[in-house]
Amino acid sequence: MARPASSQPTEVELQILRILWDDGPSIARHVHDSLQAFKQTTYSTTVKMLAVMLEKGLLRRDDRARPQIYRPAVPRQRTQKRMLKDLIDKVYDGSAGVLMLHALSSKKASPEEIAEIRRLLDELEGGK
């Protein structure tokens, strides 16, 4: 039995989304040319990936323009939050705290990141 299609972007789809978030709405040729730095594909494969992403609701396409223009369906931050929520639910049994402990113990945070984490914790505790 086939596995149901995921609404989450694959690694290549995430790279396409990054291109569109960074560069703004773009035609397929621009997406393809930019994608070549990360994954060697044919132009027809890139167009097929864009079509799949449209079906998944990850992209929007302006059919009035010629050539057609693609844009992300949702902003970067909303996609990141949705993917993080799914990760917390699936891997950390819904515990954001356990995720944070693992994240902070697995890679050294910069002084700026630590200051931001402290600020967020203070904010969550009500400014204590």
Image (spheres, rainbow, N blue to C red):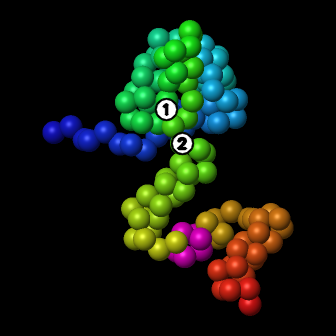
- Under tag 1, what secondary structure? strand
Quadrant placement of the N terminus? top left
Residue most extreme to the left: 1
Residues drawn in magenta:
97-102
Name of the residue lying farthest toward the top:
66
Q: Is residue 67 left or right of residue 113?
A: left
Judging by the rendered image, the residue that carries numbered circle 1 is 59
At a point 43% along the width and 44% down the height, the residue shown is: 8
Task: Find disc 2 in the rendering and name its residue.
Answer: 74
Please name the amino acid that badge 2 sits on.
Val
Residue 118 pos. (x, y %): 75, 77
The chief SS type of the magenta part is helix
104 shown above or below 76: below
* Residue under the image location 59 percent in, 74 percent down: 101
Q: Residues within 10 Å of mark 2 (few under 14, many from 20)?
A: some
Q: Nearer the viewer, residue 39 or 57?
A: 57
Where, by quadrant of the figure, is residue 38 drawn?
A: top right
Q: Position of residue 88 (x, y in %)?
A: 46, 64
Residue 28: in sight, yes or no?
no
Whether residue 6 appears in this view of the structure is yes
Residue lying at the far front of the rendered structure: 64
- Residue 86: horizontal and vertical position, in percent? 43, 58
The total of numbered circles placed on residues is 2
Q: Residues within 10 Å of mark 1 (few under 14, many from 20)?
A: many
